[in-house]
Image: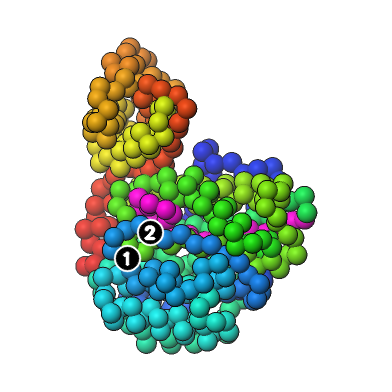
């Protein structure tokens, strides 16, 4: 299945051009089948920067149950100088104890040999079924097969290898015109279910051939993640494996200095790229028909975030979204439950441009306009909490019959 049309909620800056699938300078990638997925599809991806001065930054899930690859990457990898990434799909290597940890360590070491970099600069990631031991032998043999296929044109294969229930690839490649020169920016992500990140998304890997410090990488990644992957929900479930990594090879020779116009422009391009991928994840949503965006406005940012997340994670709101049902009482219920300590809340609610509730009370509205606003492919909700100064935006999918089928049969 091809990726859906562009979202009206995401716009790229005028100095950004979409390009064919070619990685930024200094990077090579590939994807192979190593036998983890019963289907025989690609299930092992490798990405490497050939530039010794590569800088990087990373974010990980804040789940209390951490997958082995998350622990290994966080504790045994130089997060400011990641040179290579190895990813398997079909098995999360989570809740697998010491054997799982050892498998992740061996995966890291084997990838270092294949890519020719130090093991301390190799990040490891996994996605798939939780609680099943990862067959390290298959991974090692797959890595050996991957070595000769690493290429600057391997992004498609890498993207294919990291997918599980994804219906389509989530990737993009951009040329970004900076005052100091043009750089390339690309990313590959996966995710369709178990999505309600507390930092990022299921898995996302970002590359640029700009030259910048690790501190700049960390700043840009942190800011952009908060406006994209930290603001999406498919089912309100936090994954054990969430990982996002930004790598900067410097191969373009264009240096991005702190507090410069270059940094500002690159940050804006990265922000648009990650929001684009985040909306694609929600659009996929394991059987999703419609997607929603809720914007909550309040005097206090914490309350705005709590209200927006409550609406986005509500099964009642999600099922109404699926059915195109403008049942705004479900929105009121979700906000009220989230802000019970703030009662009473002077709540305003809009669906599209139609206001249906003002200061906690229903108001007259045009029923036809409301029905039309609730049945598009992208549905807007706005919640006012009786104050100004803070705003929170969350993108979310509906809850469909297909979602239940996919997850009811996930391991069978």
Q: Is residue 26 above or below residue 243?
A: below
Mark number displayed over residue 393: none
Q: Residue at x 61, y 67 (%)?
A: 55
Position of the C terminus, as image quadrant, is bottom left
Seen from the viewer's position, the closer of residues 366 and 16 is: 16
Q: Is residue 128 among what the camera can see?
A: no
Instruction: Check residue 220 for magenta coloring.
Output: no
Q: Residue at x 54, y 54 (%)?
A: 221
- Residues marked 2 and 1 touching at CB (< 8 Å): yes
Which span is picked out in magenta? 181-206
Q: Is residue 188 above or below residue 157?
A: above
Q: Is residue 308 left or right of residue 410?
A: right
Position of the N terminus, as image quadrant, is bottom left
Q: Is residue 242 left or right of residue 148?
A: left
Q: Is residue 195 above or below residue 252?
A: above
User: Can you name the residue that lies furthest to the right here?
Assistant: 180
Q: Residue at x 50, y 78 (%)?
A: 120
Residue 238 drawn at (x, y percent): 32, 54
Seen from the viewer's position, the closer of residues 150 and 403 is: 150
Q: Which residue is mark 2?
A: 61
Q: Which residue is mark 1?
A: 66
Mark 2 vs mark 1, CA separation in Å = 8 Å
Seen from the viewer's position, the closer of residues 134 and 260 is: 260
Q: Residue 28 lies in what quarter of the image?
A: bottom right
Residue 315 drawn at (x, y percent): 25, 41
Coloration mode: rainbow
- Label 1 crowding class (10 Å Cα cut-off): few <14, some 14-19, many 20+? some
């Amino acid at each position: 299945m091809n990726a859906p049309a562009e979202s009206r909620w995401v716009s790229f800056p005028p100095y950004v051009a979409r390009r064919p699938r070619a990685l930024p300078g200094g990077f090579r990638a590939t994807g192979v089948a190593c036998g983890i997925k019963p289907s025989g599809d690609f299930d092992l991806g490798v990405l490497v920067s050939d530039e010794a001065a590569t800088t990087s930054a990373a974010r990980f899930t804040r789940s209390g149950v951490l997958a082995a690859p998350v622990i290994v990457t966080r504790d045994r990898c130089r997060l400011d100088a990641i040179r290579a990434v190895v990813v398997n799909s079909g098995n999360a290597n989570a809740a697998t104890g010491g054997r799982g940890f050892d498998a992740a360590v061996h995966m890291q070491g084997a990838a270092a040999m294949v890519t020719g970099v130090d093991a301390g600069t190799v990040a490891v990631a996994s996605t798939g079924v939780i609680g099943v031991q990862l067959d390290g032998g298959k991974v090692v043999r797959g890595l050996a097969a991957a070595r000769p296929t690493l290429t600057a044109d391997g992004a498609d294969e890498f993207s294919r290898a990291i997918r599980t229930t994804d219906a389509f690839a989530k990737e993009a490649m951009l040329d970004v015109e900076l005052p100091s020169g043009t750089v390339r920016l690309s990313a590959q992500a996966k995710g369709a279910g178990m999505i309600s990140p507390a930092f990022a998304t299921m898995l996302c890997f970002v590359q640029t051939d700009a030259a910048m410090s690790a501190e700049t990488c960390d700043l840009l990644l942190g800011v952009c993640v908060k406006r994209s992957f930290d603001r999406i929900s498919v089912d309100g479930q936090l994954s054990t494996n969430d990982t996002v990594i930004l790598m900067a090879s410097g191969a373009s020779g264009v240096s991005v200095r702190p507090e410069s116009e270059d940094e500002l422009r690159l940050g804006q391009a990265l922000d648009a790229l990650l929001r684009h991928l985040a909306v694609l994840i929600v659009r996929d949503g394991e059987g999703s028909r419609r997607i929603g965006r809720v914007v909550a406005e309040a005097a206090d940012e914490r309350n705005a975030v709590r209200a927006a997340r409550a609406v986005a994670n509500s099964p009642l709101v999600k099922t109404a979204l699926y059915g195109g049902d403008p049942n705004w009482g479900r929105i009121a219920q979700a906000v009220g439950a989230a802000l019970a300590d703030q009662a009473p809340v002077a709540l305003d609610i809009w669906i599209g441009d139609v206001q249906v509730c003002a200061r906690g009370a229903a108001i007259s509205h045009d029923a036809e306009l409301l029905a039309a606003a609730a049945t598009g492919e992208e549905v807007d909700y706005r919640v006012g909490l009786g104050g100004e100064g803070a705003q929170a935006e969350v993108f979310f999918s509906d809850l469909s019959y297909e979602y239940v089928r996919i997850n009811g049969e996930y391991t069978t």
